[in-house]
Image: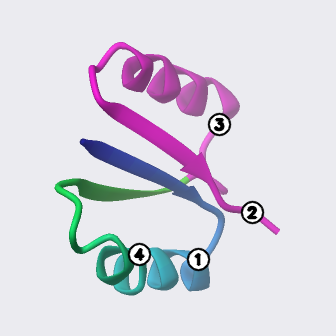
Amino acid sequence: MKLTFFVEGNMDEIFISNIVPKIFKQYNFSPHVYKYSQEKDEKIDNFIKSIKGIKDHTYFFFGG
C-alpha cells in the first residue's frame, strides 16, 4: 500500500517522516510526504487525480 501525506509546513513534514512509519511499522506501506502549501491548486488537483488512478494508494491532508 502507498500512502501520501499532504502537509502544510516543516513541522508536519517532520512528524509524518519520523513518527508515522514507527506507528505503522507492522504494515507494508511506503509513505510519501508532499508539501502542498506553496503549490497551485491545479497542481494539487492533478496530483490527487493521479493518486486516485493507482490501486492501493491512499492520501491524507494535514493542515492547521
Q: Residue 2: image x %, image y %? A: 27, 43
Q: Name the residue at 24% across, 42% down.
A: 1
Amino acid type assigned to the residue bearing label 3 in the image = Lys
Q: Earlier in the sequence, mark 3 or mark 4?
A: 4
Label 2 residue SS: loop
Question: How many C-alpha atoms fall within 10 Å of the one at disc 4: few (<14), some, or many (≥20)?
Answer: few
- The mark lying in front, picked from 3 and 4, is 4
- Tell me if residue 29 is in the magenta stretch: no
- Can you identify the residue that label 4 sits on? 20
| 55 horizontally vs 7: left or right | left
Compute the Cα span from label 4 to label 1.
11 Å
22 above or below 44? below
The image quadrant that residue 54 belongs to is: top left
Tag shown at residue 12? 1
- Can you identify the residue that label 3 sits on? 40
Which one is nearer the viewer's eye here, 3 or 48?
A: 3
Amino acid type assigned to the residue bearing label 2 in the image = Gly
Circles 1 and 2: CB atoms closer than 8 Å? yes
Compute the Cα span from label 1 to label 3.
19 Å
Tag shown at residue 43? none
Question: How many C-alpha atoms fall within 10 Å of the one at disc 3: few (<14), some, or many (≥20)?
Answer: few
Q: Magenta span covers which residues?
A: 36-64
- The mark lying in front, picked from 2 and 3, is 2
- Can you identify the residue that label 2 sits on? 63
